Amino acid sequence: MSDQTGTMVHDATGVDPLPDASRRGSRQMPLPQQRGPVSALLCGLLAGTDPEASRQRLVEAASLAAAQTPDVLFDEDLQLALFVCYELHYRGFDGVDDTWEWDPELLRARAELERVFEDRLRTAIDPVDETATTAQEVSDALFALAEGGDGPSVADFVLRHATTDQVREVMAHKSVYQLKEADPHTWAIPRLEGRAKSALVEIQMDEYGNGRPGRMHSELFARTMAGLGLDHRFGAHIEHVPAISLASVNLMSLFGLHRRLRGAVLGHLAIYEMTSSLPSSQYSRGLRRLGFGDDVAGYFDEHVEADAVHEQIAGRDMAGGLIEADPATRGQVFFGAAAVCLVDGLLGAWQLGAWEQGRSSLRMPLEAEGTDHGV
Amino acid sequence: MESDGASITVCPQGPLLVRGDFSLTDGTGAEIDNDRGTVALCRCGRSAIKPFCDGTHKLIGFDRPKK
Ligand code: FES
Ligand SMILES: [Fe+2]
Ligand SMILES: [Fe+2]
């Protein structure tokens, strides 16, 4: 691979760097466009451009909207506002002061949104009368839960029917998480000890490429996007992504950022790992059916093998290890696991439903970007 | 650091999970490409990426040999 000046660029591992690897580090995503009163006030406040936006008005608007939303999972305004609040804890936004991360009034507004979000999930999910006690029983129960969702699958659709444009849409949805893959679950590490902690670190080491530059799963995913002619900078497709897709990512941040939900974030990760190997193989074969090669399918090939390992560690040592050490976390673990099945099930149904009706699953179709995306 | 050797977890209805200090070689003694510290070796015989597990055991209802 050559960069703009035509020099051959290789790192010591022989992994080709991303097309614009040198520019990735410093760039932050811009604040997104508002989608309603709460996100308008929030973005206006963070940008400092809206003299009408005050902290107090934001808290009031969040509280009102939270009380009135017909369904927070599909509420564009609230899911975007929540995403913006959470993103301050990850990479922040271009031109936004980092001190907003711990602004008490902003956290108050966020708590209003989180409350309605978590209530929505708890209402939909029956309290688990799970009796799994040993690590192996926990693992078995989580595998059973992961297998439960036998609705139509996006991976199966990609394998058999999807067009290249539909595959690009799938990747745009995925990009909001996959370009920061593993980060939301990493918040849990300092909140654990013993076997569960070792297991989570063991998984995350792999997610972060075992220390090899260019091999982080987020970077492998960026390469997939580049090969599909998609902008692979974090946040590049945020305007396209609908509420339910943001909800899927916000779910991980909700679980990851609250110590009281540390069991839920492990349950979430366990389900992610347990629903990855087989679908990843379907994605990989679907991409090859459409004529793409290793550069695009590589991310999925890696996940076939990696997640067959991770799912074993996640069920038994990580989630099982936590419940063995602290049985009081059992309900949280299975709540987190059920929540991801619910939300990602709705996201899959959203995508497949849109394509069935012959329209885009995004808020607007992706514009043709060609392959010259490294701006 | 002292090596604890390798440990193998026999996953019920699934692979052999191998951790620790081990080397993986084929019949000729050549090293098998392996990027990760812990590996899952296929036990059901149906993986498409043998010797590694690819999750296929879940589709075929693989169960440990019963006594
Ligand atoms: S043991 Fe997993 S595919 Fe054979
Ligand atoms: Fe991964
Ligand atoms: Fe994984």
Image (cartoon, coloured by chain):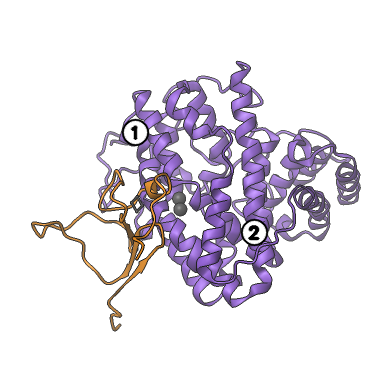
Chain colours: A purple, B orange
Q: Is B49 displayed left or right of A331 in the figure?
A: left
Which x, y percent locates residue A21? 41, 43
The amino acid sitting under disc 1 is: Gln
Q: Is residue A97 above or below residue A64?
A: below
Q: Is residue A321 above or below residue A177?
A: below
* Mark 2 residue CB less than 8 A from any atom of ligand 3: no
| Screen quadrant of the N terminus of chain A | top left
Label 1 sits on residue: A4
Viewer-nearest residue: B17 or A16: B17
Looking at the image, the residue that sits furthest to the bottom is B2
What whole-number distance in Å separates the C-alpha atoms at marks 1 and 2? 50 Å
- Rendered residue at 62%/59% (across/down): A265
Q: Is A50 displayed left or right of B63 in the figure?
A: right
Q: Which mark is residue B53?
A: none
Label 2 sits on residue: A334
Asked whether the residues under the numbered discs 1 and 2 touch, taking CB atoms below 8 Å apart as contact, a structural biologist would say: no
- Rendered residue at 63%/17% (across/down): A357
Q: Is A338 displayed left or right of A195 in the figure?
A: right
Q: Is residue A354 above or below residue A239?
A: above
